[in-house]
Image (cartoon, grey):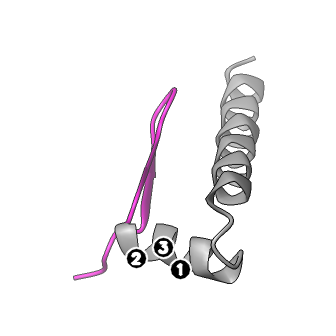
């Protein structure tokens, strides 16, 4: 069975811990950067959803 890495809801990203911690490691521990990137990703997905509803 395939493992879900991320679930996107209307206002949340539910993300796999391994994926999150790997992103923090890649950012050399800069969790604020990763947080900002995840918020931007959610905003993009929300924009795509709103555009498809029009």
Q: Residues within 10 Å of mark 2 (few under 14, many from 20)?
A: few
Q: Is residue 54 left or right of residue 4?
A: right
Q: Residue at x 64, y 41 (%)?
A: 42
Residue under circle 3? Answer: 21
Label 3, label 2: how many angstroms apart (C-alpha)? 5 Å
Q: Which mark is residue 22?
A: 1
Where is residue 45 shown, x and y percent of the image?
68, 41
Q: Where are the magenta residues, as a range?
A: 1-16
Dots 3, 2 in contact, CB < 8 A: yes
Spot occupied by residue 29 in the image (x, y as percentages of width and height): 63, 72
Which quadrant does the N terminus fall into? bottom left
Is 10 included in the stretch rendered in magenta? Answer: yes
Q: Are marks 2 and 1 in contact (CB under 8 Å)?
A: yes
Judge by depth and name the residue closer to the eye, 33 or 16.
Answer: 33
**Outermost residue, left side:** 1
Q: Which label sits on residue 18?
A: 2
Left or right of 18, for residue 10 = right
Does the residue at mark 3 contact the one at mark 1 (Cβ under 8 Å)? yes
Task: Indicate the position of residue 22 as horizontal and vertical percent values.
Answer: 53, 80
33 falls in the magenta region: no
- The residue at the point 67 percent across, 41 percent down is 39
Could you say whether the residue bearing mark 2 is in a helix, strand or loop? helix
Asked which quadrant contains residue 53, the reply is top right
Q: Quick check: 1 above or below 4?
A: below
Q: Residues within 10 Å of mark 1 (few under 14, many from 20)?
A: few
């Amino acid at each position: 069975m395939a493992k879900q890495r991320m679930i996107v809801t209307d206002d949340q990203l539910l993300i796999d811990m391994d994926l999150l911690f790997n992103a923090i490691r890649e950012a050399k521990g800069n969790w604020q950067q990763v947080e900002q990137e995840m918020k931007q990703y959610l905003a993009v997905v929300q924009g795509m959803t709103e555009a498809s509803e029009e």
